[in-house]
Image (cartoon, rainbow, N blue to C red):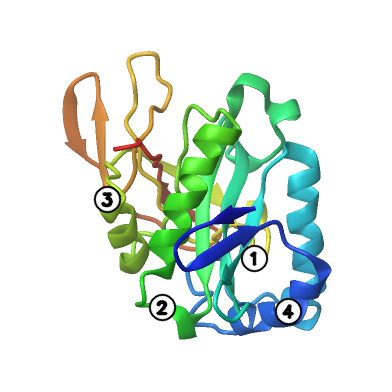
Amino acid sequence: MIETERLVLRPPTPEDAPFLRELHCDPVAMEFIGGVHPKAAADPAFVVRRWLERWDDNGCGPFSVIRRHDGRWLGRTGILVWDVRSWTHTTFASAGEHAQPELGWALAREHWGQGYATEAVSAAREWAYAERSVERLVSVIAPRNLRSERLAQRLGCTPGETVNLSSRDITPGVAPVSLAKSGVVGANGGLTIAAVPLTVTQHGTTQPVYPVGVGATSNRTIGGFRTP
């Protein structure tokens, strides 16, 4: 469990499921993170089970974000693991050296604009570095998801390259359908810690990268976080 000034971040519980509808049944809140998935909307306990599977598999996963003063469920933030060879969801054990943790977030729309997301994501990032010895983090942000881009910028994130992810790799309520990530590509071709907008820094040379493409495959910009 993580405590901040206004929030508690804890692993999800089955009791969280009814509150997930505020997020997962809202097409505006879900626009850039998979949309309103019928199964997730009909059975939010399904999403909680998937989140708990992430924790079991990786020793990390989505936290439920709880407001301290009244216990209200606000949303989620936490870690998802990708295999960078295929940019598909995986486990640390399966992907080995190719595993890339991602820090993501989503709050119910009622709680936007109050600084909760920044507070929660900052705490989750610190936890990942301190408690899970994560060396690199990336964030997945849709090219038009300006709110998340601005949040990443507030956290001191820097831009990176673009990758393509197929919609079949999306888990409802866990990872976005339309993504953008950013990160700095090091001399060895690996991502160092950075994030958002749409520019890649490679071998000391900066070159713009613009997201294109629609349909089943969308361009994404890769990103990670460097602790300021």
User: Mark 1 belongs to which amino acid?
Assistant: Gly
In the picture of the structure, the residue carrying the numbered disc 1 is 173
| Farthest-out residue, top | 188
Q: Secondary structure at mark 1?
A: loop
Q: Is residue 216 left or right of residue 89?
A: left
In the picture of the structure, the residue carrying the numbered disc 2 is 112
- The image shows residue 156 at horizontal and vertical percentages of 27, 45
Q: Is residue 79 left or right of residue 193?
A: right
- Sequence order check: which comes first, mark 2 or mark 4? 4
User: Mark 2 belongs to which amino acid?
Assistant: Trp
Q: Secondary structure at mark 4?
A: helix
Q: Is residue 172 left or right of residue 203?
A: right
Q: Foreground: 22 or 220?
A: 22
Instruction: Look at 57% across and 74% down and name the residue there.
Output: 35
Closer to the eye: label 2 or 1: 2
Residue contact between numbered discs 3 and 2, judged by CB atoms under 8 Å: no
Q: CA distance from mark 2 to mark 4?
A: 24 Å
In the picture of the structure, the residue carrying the numbered disc 3 is 197
Q: Foreground: 40 or 110?
A: 110
Residue contact between numbered discs 2 and 4, judged by CB atoms under 8 Å: no
Closer to the eye: label 2 or 4: 2
Q: Is residue 106 visible?
A: yes
In the picture of the structure, the residue carrying the numbered disc 4 is 38
Instruction: Look at 34% across and 26% down and name the residue there.
Output: 185
The picture quadrant where one finds residue 10 is bottom right
Quadrant placement of the C terminus: top left
